[in-house]
Image (spheres, grey):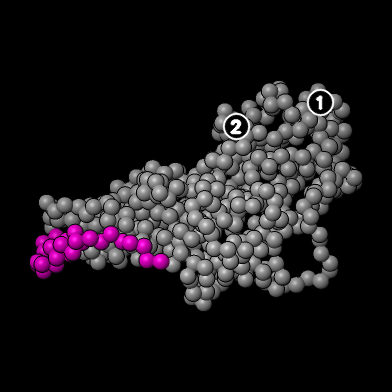
Amino acid sequence: MGALDEGHYYLELENGVKRGGNVKLSFEDEPEILDIEDAVRVLLQGLGEDIEREGLRKTPLRVAKALREGTRGYKQTVKDIVCGALFPEAGLESGVGHAGGAGGLVIVRDLDLFSYCESCLFPFQIKCHVGYVPYGHRVVGLSKLSRVADIFAKRLQDPQRLANELCTALQHGIKATGIAVVLQCSHIHLPNFETAILDPNHKGWVKILVTSGTGVFEDEKSDTWTDFLSLLRFRDVNVENIYSRGSSEKSWCRSHEFCKTEPANSVMLNAVASILCSLGEDPLRKELVETPACFVNWLMKFRNTNLDMKLNGFVRNRRDSLTSNGGVDHTEDCICSELNLTLWSQCEHHLLPFHGAVHIGYYCSNGASPVGRSLLQSIVHFYGFKLQVQERLTRQIAETVSSILGEDVMVVVEANHMCMIARGIEKFGSNTATFGVLGRFSTDSAARAKFLQIIPSSCPARD
């Protein structure tokens, strides 16, 4: 079965990127990588950080690598993928593509992708479903549908534009009777810091479903669309929640709210604009004009400052009560807990947010009042609103709580990390859990098991 040369079907993509000559520099020496690294150093200094600190020394290169990998689609073309991947297949006729049942709808489902949101520069997850009706005795290698989808996903994107660009490129590349694209997209639900940051019921994700169609799929009420969507229902796709194709609603990414909070540092704004240029984008494109301000204003929430940790007189009184009697009998102690404390932080390795919940267990003498939730939440925010790594954050919370409530403390942190998505290894619904155990919890497996059973099966990190 020979491949057809369909190069003349190629749709010239107007991305303005010229493919370079034959001289190949090492990745780390490419001018674009070096420019992004310089810009990231400017951002770190704007946060009041020491760029030579051990945890930050390689951050500029890590960020540059992640961004270049996540936007490599600017340097790829559909022609490179589709040309040579069209194969003749007898029984496919002209018209609607049906020939006695042999030339009907072809669907590739559940393609896992990720893209970078053009509004906030944070990655978002995509479950992609592509369908087409063949035309003119031609079918396309199915793996090529995934590779073409990845080209457009690996650019700064909006879900609806991504669906439209993928649909149009496949239509021109395959010359099918019709192309259909359905995308299930999940974006981190950025909080309103004035109201939602303390809300334990704040949902971690915004999820939308968008569609695009050409040819026989242009009519959303056509029988062909009905067939396609019916097959997707087998994959638990809720087709009743399809996002309007023409909608201009901005609830998908709430980063635009941060643009209006305070004037951003002009030097940091210029640094983000230079990153956009290095990726192959135009910072003056209307969808990107506010992006530097959105990103900088979010980042500045995690600048290197000492937030107020509300350790009031209650703490002093409680520590006195814990230490006044050296011969404390622990036989009457019980495990107390505070669950689903809200966590927002920023990964110092990739400058991307992570969010989730903190669960704290500690021993409390019978008859004693458990510590207030607001105090423990204050400790979580104190260590969360910095450039962090989850392991260090867990240890710091455990040590601080231990210094206040006594040495017997267990801390569990569950979080979703945007950097996991950006590195292309995140599976839908996965999250990272870390433990900090001190005192009796470190030696008593039964106590650890008892506390773990208390943690609810649903929390912000898993929603």
Q: Amino acid at mark 1?
A: Val
Question: Is 217 displayed left or right of 329 in the figure?
Answer: right
Q: Quadrant of residue 394?
A: bottom left
Would residue 426 be seen by someone viewing this image from the given angle? no
Report which residue position mark 2 lands on.
Answer: 242
- Label 1 Cα neighbours within 10 Å, binned few <14 / some 14-19 / many ≥20: some
Comparing 431 with 89, the one in front is 431
Would residue 119 be seen by someone viewing this image from the given angle? yes
Q: Range of the magenta residues?
A: 305-330
* Disc 1 versus disc 2: nearer the observer: 2
Question: Is 92 displayed left or right of 348 in the figure?
Answer: right
Q: Amino acid at mark 2?
A: Ile
Question: Is 264 displayed left or right of 5 in the figure?
Answer: left
- The residue shown at (36%, 49%) is 198
Comparing 302 with 410, the one in front is 302
x and y, in percent, of residue 168 in the image: 77, 40
x and y, in percent, of residue 7 in the image: 88, 47
Q: Quadrant of residue 98?
A: top right
Q: Most extreme residue toward the bottom, as rendered?
A: 52
Residue 96 circle label: 1
Q: Is residue 149 magenta?
A: no
In the image, residue 195 above or below residue 262 = above
Q: Is residue 316 magenta?
A: yes
What SS does tag 2 mark? Answer: loop
x and y, in percent, of residue 184 in the image: 59, 40
- Label 2 Cα neighbours within 10 Å, binned few <14 / some 14-19 / many ≥20: some
Report how many numbered discs are placed on residues in the image: 2
Mark closest to the chain's N terminus, 1 or 2: 1
In the image, residue 182 above or below residue 124 = above
- The residue shown at (76%, 57%) is 75
